[in-house]
Image (cartoon, rainbow, N blue to C red):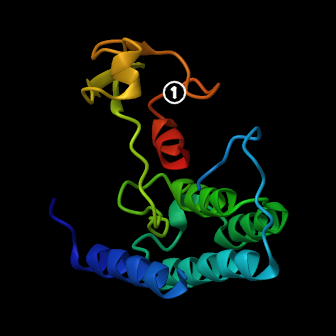
Amino acid sequence: MNLTSSKKVFLFVVIMSLLVCSTNLIVPANLPQQNLNVYDKERGKNMLLSLKEDLKKYYYDSTFHSMDVDTRFKAAEEKIQQATSNGQIFGIIAQTLMDLNDSHTFFLPPSRTAKVEYGWQVQMIGNKCYVVAVKPDSDGDKKGLRPGDEVETINGFAPSRQDLWKIQYTY
């Protein structure tokens, strides 16, 4: 990928902002709710503010693809105030940048401290989600899960090309 100098600087600033501000994307409603404290919500608002400032300073399109940045970020800040989990906060921030519809501008949430392996992997092929790998002797293997099996839902959510990453991040 060949990025222009200004895009490299913008991407660097966005990543650095996240590292400085960091200390689940849109979380389905049936998951247990976290008790967010004032600090969690303030951290989310600070991340959002930092991204807004970087966007205004470094973004290559001064019209922001005709998006009213102040209004959009104000709405995101109000949503963060109503969020019930860090995942929702990160999802709100991610969606705000995704609304620019620019493949070079995106939000990378802070890394998780734990990694969960389910013993199987999925991938979107066309518009359908399929199992592409099953770990031998895993629960999935013992229950008969095989590569090529179609996944219709994951914990009640139908995966699609647009939201499989949210499901994978959340679970």
The picture places residue 97, in percent across and down from the top left corner, at 54, 61
| Residue 155, image quadrant | top right
Rendered position, 169 above or below 83? above
Rendered position, 23 above or below 83? below
Residue depicted at x 69% and y 41%: 28
Give the residue type that dot 1 points to.
Pro
The picture places residue 143, in percent across and down from the top left corner, at 41, 15
Residue depicted at x 82% and y 67%: 78
Rendered position, 126 above or below 90? above
Evaluate whether residue 22 shows in this view: yes
Residue depicted at x 49% and y 27%: 160
The picture places residue 106, in percent across and down from the top left corner, at 44, 61
Left/right placement of residue 54 relative to residue 35 reads: left
Rendered position, 104 above or below 117? below
Q: Nearer the viewer, residue 126 or 146?
A: 146
| Residue 3, image quadrant | bottom left
Left/right placement of residue 104 relative to residue 112 reads: left
The picture places residue 95, in percent across and down from the top left corner, at 59, 55
Secondary structure type for disc 1: loop
User: Can you identify the residue that label 1 sits on?
Assistant: 159
| Residue 123, image quadrant | top left
Left/right placement of residue 105 relative to residue 53 reads: left
- The residue sitting at the left extreme is 2
Indicate the quadrant containing the N terminus: top left, top right, bottom left or bottom right: bottom left
Evaluate whether residue 126 shows in this view: no
Q: Residues within 10 Å of mark 1 (few under 14, many from 20)?
A: many
